[in-house]
Amino acid sequence: MNRIDRIIAAYDGVALHIAAGTAIAAGAVLLALLAHHLLMLVGRKAAARTPSSTDDLIVERLALPLRWIFCAIALTAVLPALRLNDDAADIWQRVFGLGVPALMGWLLIAILNALQDVMIARTDITVEDNLRARRKRTRAGILHRITVFLVLVITLCMMLISIPSVRSIGVTLIASAGLAALAVGAAAQPALKNLIAGIQMAFTEPIRIDDVVVLDNEWGRIEEIRLTYVVIRIWDDRRLVVPVSRFLEQPFQNWTRESAQLLGNIVLYLDPTADIARLRAHLATVMDRMPLWDRRFHNLQVTDMKADMIEVRALMTAKDGPTAFDLRCAVREALLAYIAAEMPEALLRRRIAPADGDWPVTPSASPSPATAPPASADRTA
């Protein structure tokens, strides 16, 4: 009976110890959550008093990872009071070794995301002159993705190093690192190629966010630049996904490389007798009434001549590509309407000239029945 009492007492002691440890850990976590709540409350109030919204973005980004870091610090602080045995202490060390690098990496990524949000808030690309803003946003976006990738790789390595079995295997892996690097490099050559191209693009800047490009006869805007690919929004809302290396190895058209302003043109094919001076004067009248024209330049010239027609080209400037397209369509319609109503002689006509010696043409008289040869004569002949 005494033995049973001792066993019961031992179990009661263990249960009491577990209950006490659980209470201490729960109390520490509650205090950590309370401290985090008070800190975030003070941070949000301080951010609300400033006119800028960037500090509000930083506080919101850091709120969640800081909550878990506070809890981890609280549990670490009360660890001696828990009086864990060797097995429990070993499990805690494993969890701690995996959790601390993960939390630190999470915090660093949250800081990077907060800085990215601040950059986006400070660079408005919706304004008309947005070249500098697009340049900053593009470079910041590419560098942000590269940094996040490196943080994830380092965090994963730190977590694996904390595992003793993986740490012991690491010595063997280092010995064969050369062959492994060659194998991985050969297998991941396209991905590494695009990754290096993305890093190069961050500094050379052949394209930027919201650039207007023409690629494979497709007109669109750069919507997103990733580490290995670029998303282009086509004019009809399709998406063209292109590897990053494509923009460094093959030619493409960038309509907004230095400025969004463009020179548009329309071509008309008219009769050689068309009054070009009159049409040029009407073009000036049309351009003065066009709100899409940016008032920089317009002109009308005969650029080519064929045997039965002339090629007339009208040039006009606009603030950007979409506006230039709409302006060209509007001017083309206005000139065609004017030619049809006021200058019908300018419409293209086909002329057929007779051969030499056949002008003028006189109708020949048909033979009379009296002079016509008899049918019998034709048959006998």
Image (tube, grey):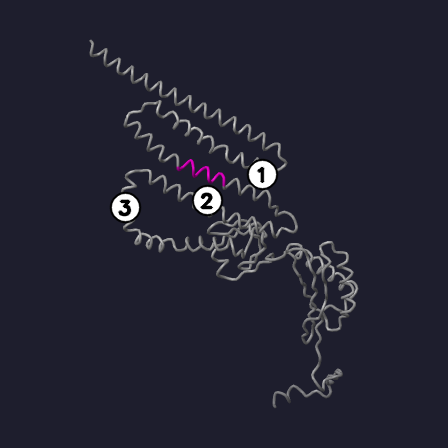
- Give the Cα distance between marks 1 and 3: 46 Å
Q: Nearer the viewer, residue 304 or 293?
A: 293
Magenta stretch secondary structure, dominant: helix
Instruction: Read off the residue under disc 3.
Output: 171
Which residues make up the magenta segment? 101-111
Q: Is residue 345 magenta?
A: no
Q: Residue flagged by tag 2: what amino acid is it? A: Val
Amino acid on which the number 3 mark rests in the picture: Val
Say which residue label 1 marks.
54
Q: Kindly identify the residue that appears in the image at 71 percent across and 75 percent down.
A: 351
| Horizontal relation, residue 93 to residue 307: left or right | left
Mark 1: few, some, or many residues within 10 Å (few <14, many ≥20)?
A: some
Tell whether 144 sits left or right of 72: right
Residue 94 % position (x, y): 33, 33
Q: Where is residue 77 in the image (x, y as percent from the top left)?
A: 39, 27
Q: Please identify the quadrant where the N terminus is shown.
A: top left
Instruction: Label 2: state its secondary structure.
Output: helix
Q: Mark 2 points at which residue?
A: 148
Is the residue 304 above or below the residue 100 in the image?
Answer: below
State the separation of the CA atoms marked 2 and 1: 20 Å
- x, y percent for residue 244: 48, 54
